[in-house]
Amino acid sequence: AVVVESYRKTLTAGNLQTLDDIAARDDPKFSGVSEIQYAAMRAKQAGVAILGGEPPLSEEVQALQTQGYSIPDMCSYYFLRQIPQYKRENNPLVENPEALLEAFMQRMHAGLPAIQEQDLSYSQFLTVFKERLGVDFDIASITPTLVRGENEPGSNFFQKIGHHVGLRRDPNLLRVIDEALEQNACVMVAYGAGHLVTLRPALEAGLGASVDSQPFPPGVLPRLFPEGMGAANEAVKQGRKATRAEDPPPRP
């Protein structure tokens, strides 16, 4: 099985139009395809199960609301988190941030109907950004570090949101991996390297071995946490606390 980032449910040809579009290109060089899409496409070609590792967006939003964050705060965070990707993809709307936000909010409304009555205008976003960070928004200066999940002295407002989002995403990813190991002898996880920094302590605690240098032979992969996901979630929390300041490992 292949577990992929960004998708929030099991992926099939029927509900993953993006992969169908990529396959239709018949491009052997896979130009313009992200690592996640490449992994999913290869899995699809090989008939391997593809699993989304993300929790429902509604659960993330509910968790953030319990922490006191408003819908404009959250939408601003999610928008800022996407901007570096938009730049990598050479999205033409990067030159027009207002239009970029409008397109982004259309996607948010489609994925989370509960916020359809609470739009985020560009002027509102600029106000939130200035109030939360004390500086004016400049799309050229937005990097992944701005929203990287941290909850330390000196962490900015959006980094703290990212920390709480991570406390929902990482345990869910671990649960998906755990369940995938019930049905598959080998599981590939196509996620950003920063997640390994957070999850390594939990994965190694469950596997009883290094996740980097001591793979298990096919057919003998144990359940990660047979005593239940409570222990796994605690391991994730400890991993986030102990390793969040560590730089992500380099890409292989």
Image (cartoon, grey):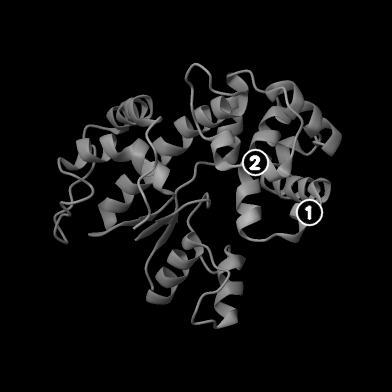
Horizontal side of 194 relative to 130 (left or right) equals left
What label sits on residue 114 in the rendered view? none
Q: Secondary structure at mark 2?
A: loop
How many marks the image carries: the answer is 2
Seen from the viewer's position, the closer of residues 32 and 75 is 32
Residue 66 in the image: state x and y as whole percent. 59, 20
Count neighbours of disc 1 (C-alpha within 10 A) and say few if under 14, some if 14 to 19, many if 20 or more.
few
Q: Which residue is mark 1?
A: 95
- Disc 2 marks which residue? 142
Q: Quadrant of the C terminus?
A: bottom left
Q: Which quadrant would residue 48 be assigned to in this image? A: bottom left
**Mark 2 burial class by Cα count in 10 Å: few <14, some 14-19, many 20+:** some
Location of the N terminus by quadrant is bottom left
- Looking at the image, is mark 1 or mark 2 earlier in the sequence? 1
Residue 116 vertical position relative to residue 241 in the rendered view, above or below? below
Residue at the (80%, 47%) spot, across then down: 102
Judge left or right: residue 69 versus residue 96: left
In whole angstroms, how far apart are the C-alphas of marks 1 and 2? 13 Å
Position above or below: 231 against 106: above
Task: Point out residue 109 in the picture as x, y percentages from the top left corner.
Answer: 74, 44
Whether 117 is drawn above or below 135: the answer is: below
Q: Is residue 233 left or right of residue 78?
A: left
* 176 vs 122: above or below: below
Q: Amino acid at mark 2?
A: Ile
Please name the residue shown 57% across and 64% down the image: 16
Q: Quadrant of residue 223?
A: top left
Image position, residue 8 (x, y; %):
52, 49
